[in-house]
Image (cartoon, rainbow, N blue to C red):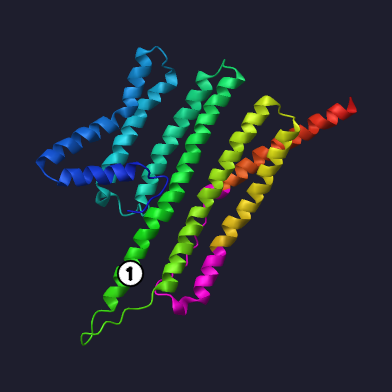
Amino acid sequence: MNFHILNFPWEQIGWGLRQLSLSGAGGNVLAIVLFLLIGFLPCGVFVLLKKKGKALPIDWMLVVLTVVLFWVLYYMINPGLLPVAMVSGKMLLGSAFYSVLIGYVVIRVISGNKYADVIALQKALRIVLYVVMVLFAWSVVAELFINLPAAIEVVKEGNVAMGMPSNFLYDVPDLTMTYVFLILQSVVNALPNALCGIVVLLCIRVLDELLRDAYSQQAQTLVKRILRFCKKSLVVVVVSGMALNLLQIALAHMLYQVNVEVNIPIFSILFFMVIHLIARYIEENQKLKLDNDLFI
């Protein structure tokens, strides 16, 4: 079970519920109860908001989110039922859920803070940024400490099986270089999310400074730092993938597994570009304010 940020935590929950269901009659009943409780969580939030008198029209979206969550959980529990055309079915399921959730949260924040002050908006944005940073951090940890050991184990079992005893003598291949490249592949896979997490941390610092004084020297320095970091991150992400592929081709004769992929981290690249664009806008606004002050 490979970790992907878009599937978390629903793939893990689905796997757990499936194992529980297969454990026996009692486990099956408990799995069904947990399935219903988890699926109805969005509706529970809606009922709670209603009781507290804080519900907004957009909160009816929580009912839609409940339907989507049941759909996602069902196929995460029974991935074999996914249509053949959905090669990346679990990723599409996770994307569907988070697209609805993020859309709801964004509209809810905008609607709920229509008359709120800037401080309230800042607090809401800080919470979102911290959640995003935690997700990026967890995706890096999962890639390096869950996906990587699993990949190494698969290669080890597959190649040791090829070196079965012949006349009671074992001929086990040397997999050292293959393991090295699996580690490099895992690092390259984790790198975009690690860099995105650092960018989010910088964004939080910029946000705090902009609220104190949007035109201070510190705010200008932090904005320029984000601009430089985004540029370098884009180059590192693109070049690292290309370099790994070329290196694998050059040393293919020494490897027992070659994974040459055109794996372009579109999400990370778009994330860097959006942050870069926002930072550029803030920088231009700061320059305009400085020019106006000099003119006056």
Q: Which residue is mark 1?
A: 156
Regarding residue 38, the answer to whether it shows in the image is yes
Image coords of residue 110 (percent x, y)? 53, 23
Magenta residues, start to end: 242-269
Label 1 SS: helix
x, y percentage for residue 118?
Answer: 61, 21
> In the rendered structure, does residue 255 fall within the stretch colored magenta?
yes
Q: Does residue 125 appear to the left or right of 148 in the view shown?
A: right
- Identified at 71% across, 42% down, the residue is 224
Residue drawn 62% across and 29% down?
208
Q: Indicate the quadrant where residue 84 lies.
A: bottom left
Q: Position of residue 190 (x, y in %)?
A: 48, 54
- Residue 270 higher or lower than 40, as above or below: below
- Magenta-drawn stretch contains 4: no
Direction from residue 87 to residue 135 in the image, left or right: right
Instruction: Give the crowd class for mark 1: few <14, some 14-19, many >=20 residues within 10 Å.
Output: some
Location of residue 58 with respect to 288 vertically, above or below: above
Residue type marked 1: Lys
* Residue at the image position 53 percent from the left and 76 percent from the top: 250
